[in-house]
Image (tube, rainbow, N blue to C red):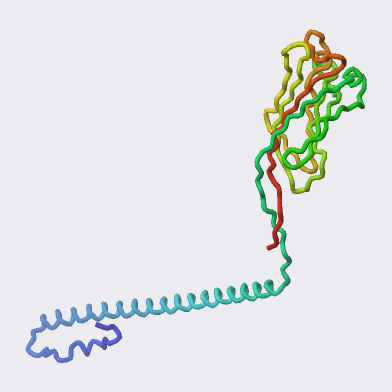
C-alpha cells in the first residue's frame, strides 16, 4: 500500500453500506476508521520527513564529491607545473662492501733512548697497501698522568698515508706486540673495539702502549742495543666504497 495513493477517509467508507447497522456497530466502525486515519497520517508525516532528510544527505554528498574533484584538479595542475621544470640528474651513491684485508707490520727501531728524551721525535715504518690504501705505523712519545704523576709512554699511531675519497671509510681491528730480545716475553695489547677511519679521521693512536720505565727494565729484555722489536697487525674492513650513477 503506497501512502501517496491514500485518500481522505470518505474514500475508506466508499462501498460500505452503513444502513441496517445499529448505532453501537456504527460507532465502533467509525472509531476504527479514525484510528486508521491517524496512523496513516503519522506514516505520511514520517515518510515526508525521511524524504526530506534523504534529499538533504544527497545534496551534502554531491557537495563533498564536487569539493573532492576540485582538490584533485588542483593537485593535477600542480603536478603538471612541476613536471614541466627541468629535472637535473642526481648522483646516487651505491655502496660496495669489500672483503677484509690483513697485514702485519714487523719493525725494528733503533735509538729508543733518544726517542725517550725527545718529544718531537717519531719513528716511521715503511708504508704497506692494505684494503686498497696505504698505511703506516708511527712510534713516538706521549706524556700522561698516572695517579697524579706525569709519566712518559711509548705511543703507537696507525695512519693512512695515501689519498682517499671523502666517501670512503673503513673500520680496522688492530693488535700490538712488543717482543723481548732476551727471552720469550711478549708484551701485547689489543683494540677490543674497531676504530673507524675516514678522510677526516685518518689516524688513531694508542697513547699509553707501555710506560718507558717498564720498557727499559733490563730483566724484561725489550730494549737491546738501544733498539726495540714491534709488530702491529691490522685487519681492514672497507665499509663504504662508493661509485656513482645518474638517475
Q: Is residue 213 above or below residue 15?
A: above
Q: Is residue 101 above or below residue 166?
A: above
Residue 117 shown left or right of residue 106 in the figure: right
Residue 232 shown left or right of residue 224 in the figure: left
Name the quadrant of the N terminus. Answer: bottom left
Q: Is residue 174 above or below residue 36?
A: above
Residue depicted at 72% across the width and 13% down the height: 184
Residue depicted at 49% across the width and 78% down the height: 62
* Residue 111, x across and y down, in percent: 89, 20
Choose top left, top right, bottom left or bottom right for residue 110: top right
Residue 178 shown left or right of residue 52 in the figure: right
* Residue 164, x across and y down, in percent: 79, 45
Residue depicted at 9% across the width and 90% down the height: 19
Give whichever of 96, 32 is nearer the camera: 96
User: Among all residues in the image, which is located at the extreme top?
Assistant: 219
Residue depicted at 73% across the width and 29% down the height: 104
Name the quadrant of the C terminus. Answer: bottom right
Residue 222 shown left or right of residue 78 in the figure: right
Q: Is residue 18 above or below residue 186?
A: below
Give whichever of 82, 39 is nearer the camera: 82
* Residue 155, x across and y down, in percent: 82, 25
Query: What is the tally of numbered marks visible in this picture?
Result: 0
Choose top left, top right, bottom left or bottom right for residue 53: bottom left
Choose top left, top right, bottom left or bottom right for residue 100: top right
Amino acid at each position: 500500500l503506497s501512502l501517496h495513493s491514500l485518500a481522505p477517509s470518505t474514500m475508506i467508507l466508499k462501498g460500505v453500506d452503513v444502513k441496517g447497522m445499529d448505532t453501537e456497530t456504527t460507532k465502533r466502525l467509525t472509531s476504527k476508521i479514525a484510528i486508521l486515519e491517524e496512523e496513516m497520517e503519522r506514516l505520511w508525516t514520517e515518510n515526508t520527513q525521511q524524504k526530506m532528510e534523504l534529499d538533504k544527505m544527497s545534496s551534502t554528498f554531491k557537495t563533498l564529491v564536487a569539493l573532492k574533484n576540485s582538490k584533485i584538479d588542483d593537485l593535477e595542475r600542480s603536478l603538471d607545473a612541476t613536471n614541466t621544470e627541468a629535472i637535473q640528474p642526481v648522483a646516487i651513491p651505491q655502496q660496495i662492501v669489500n672483503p677484509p684485508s690483513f697485514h702485519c707490520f714487523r719493525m725494528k727501531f733503533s735509538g729508543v733512548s733518544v726517542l725517550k728524551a725527545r718529544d718531537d721525535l717519531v719513528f716511521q715504518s715503511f708504508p704497506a697497501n692494505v684494503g686498497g690504501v696505504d698505511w703506516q705505523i708511527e712510534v713516538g712519545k706521549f706524556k700522561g698522568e698516572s695517579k697524579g704523576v706525569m709519566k712518559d709512554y711509548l705511543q703507537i699511531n696507525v695512519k693512512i698515508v695515501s689519498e682517499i675519497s671523502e666517501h670512503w671509510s673503513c673500520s680496522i681491528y688492530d693488535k700490538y706486540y712488543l717482543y723481548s730480545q732476551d727471552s720469550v716475553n711478549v708484551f701485547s695489547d689489543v683494540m677490543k673495539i674497531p676504530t673507524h677511519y675516514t678522510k677526516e679521521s685518518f689516524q688513531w693512536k694508542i697513547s699509553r702502549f707501555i710506560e718507558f720505565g717498564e720498557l727499559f727494565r733490563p730483566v724484561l729484555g725489550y730494549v737491546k742495543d738501544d733498539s726495540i722489536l714491534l709488530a702491529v697487525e691490522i685487519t681492514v674492513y672497507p665499509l663504504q666504497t662508493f661509485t656513482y650513477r645518474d638517475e
